[in-house]
Image (cartoon, helix red, strand yellow):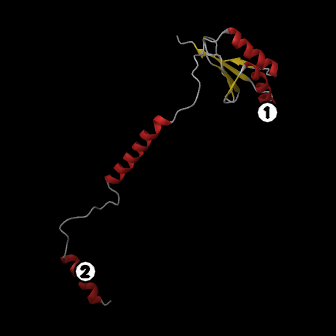
Amino acid sequence: MSRNDCEAILYLHRAFRPRRRTGRGFLNGTVFLDAALLITTFVLATAPFVLKPGIALDLPNATQTTGIQFNDMVLKITREGFFFFNDEILSATKLEPALRAALEKRPGIALILEADASVSQATATAAYDAAAAAGFHQIFIATQKLKK
């Protein structure tokens, strides 16, 4: 390319200017609006379906509550008298062998007894006795803090 060709190109560039200006930014608001709508749609579509499986218990109230470790084993007793341990339903006769097997896998761990407030004292005592017979040395009774 000679010097004259370069001057001709520069002349054309100065002579022909577009009437409309194009956008100077690489991203405009549409991209951000699309991303925000996609994220909102995803959150709204998936949030109601994420449920934590569990058993509805109404724990008794107490004024004296202490903290317990998060990794302790939990035995739940429903108001109907069902025993739930390690994600399975157990009968009163199968409770002690299941607790003993769990204690052999994790020796020295504590057991948290979560019994519904309407569970009879005889049922809660039977679960406590089965845990003691299985070899648990620390058995805690779960309560909720009394609201003032």
Callout 1–callout 2 Cβ contact below 8 Å: no
How many residues crowd mark 1 within 10 Å: few (<14), some (14–19), many (20+)? few
Q: Which residue: 73% across, 23% down?
A: 111
- x then y, percent, for residue 6: 28, 85
Residue located beneath label 2 in the image: 10
User: Which quarter of the picture shows residue 3?
Assistant: bottom left
Q: Which residue: 31% across, 90% down?
A: 2
Up-down relation of residue 23 to residue 34 (above or below)? below
Q: Which residue: 73% across, 12% down?
A: 125
Dot 1 falls on a residue whose secondary structure is helix
Q: CA distance from mark 1 to mark 2?
A: 83 Å
11 with respect to 142 (left or right): left
- The amino acid sitting under disc 1 is Lys
Q: Nearer the viewer, residue 141 or 19?
A: 141
- x then y, percent, for residue 32: 36, 51
Q: Nearer the viewer, residue 2 or 37?
A: 37
Up-down relation of residue 82 to residue 5 (above or below)? above
Question: Does the rendering let one see residue 6?
Answer: yes
Residue 69's disc number: none
User: Which quarter of the picture shows residue 18?
Assistant: bottom left
- The amino acid sitting under disc 2 is Leu
Dot 2 falls on a residue whose secondary structure is helix
Residue located beneath label 1 in the image: 105
82 with respect to 24 (left or right): right
Up-down relation of residue 82 to residue 120 (above or below)? below
